[in-house]
């Protein structure tokens, strides 16, 4: 949706039992590496505001760039977009 970013992480889930073990960070780095190899230099991700993953993306220096309201099963949620203008930053984090 946002033409300022060449790549988007659509979904990334790590079971709670595996949180804080570096798995999410490794997945993000693999995604950033693959995008960089394909010539894509920027990336974004949407996450529900109340989702603990928001803190994960902030810890990876994701910049909060936008928010929007969405409905899931008739319930309204706030979704936040985090972005990186240079995928190389994710490879060195």
Image: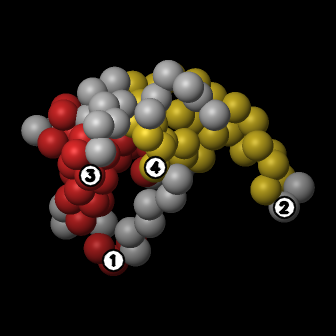
54 up-or-down from 2: above or below: below
The CA span between labels 1 and 3 is 26 Å
Q: Nearer the viewer, mark 1 or mark 2?
A: 2
Location of residue 41 (image quadrant) = top left
The CA span between labels 4 and 1 is 22 Å
Q: Quadrant of the N terminus?
A: top right
Residue highlighted by disc 3: 34
- Residue 27, percent across and down? 27, 60
Residue highlighted by disc 2: 73
Location of residue 42 (image quadrant) = top left
Observer-nearest of 35 and 13: 35
| Residue occupying image coordinates x 29% and y 45% | 38
Mark before the other along the chain sequence, 1 or 2: 1
| Residue occupying image coordinates x 50% and y 58% | 11
| Residue occupying image coordinates x 34% and y 36% | 40
Do the CB atoms of the residues marked 1 and 2 lie less than 8 Å apart?
Answer: no
Residue highlighted by disc 1: 17
């Amino acid at each position: 949706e946002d033409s300022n970013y060449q790549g988007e992480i659509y979904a990334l889930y790590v079971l709670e039992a595996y949180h804080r073990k570096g798995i999410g960070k490794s997945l993000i780095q693999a995604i950033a590496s693959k995008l960089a190899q394909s010539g894509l230099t920027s990336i974004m991700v949407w996450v529900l505001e109340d989702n603990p993953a928001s803190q994960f993306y902030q810890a990876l220096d994701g910049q909060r760039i936008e928010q929007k309201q969405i409905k899931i099963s008739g319930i309204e949620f706030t979704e936040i977009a985090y972005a990186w203008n240079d995928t190389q930053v994710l490879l060195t984090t």
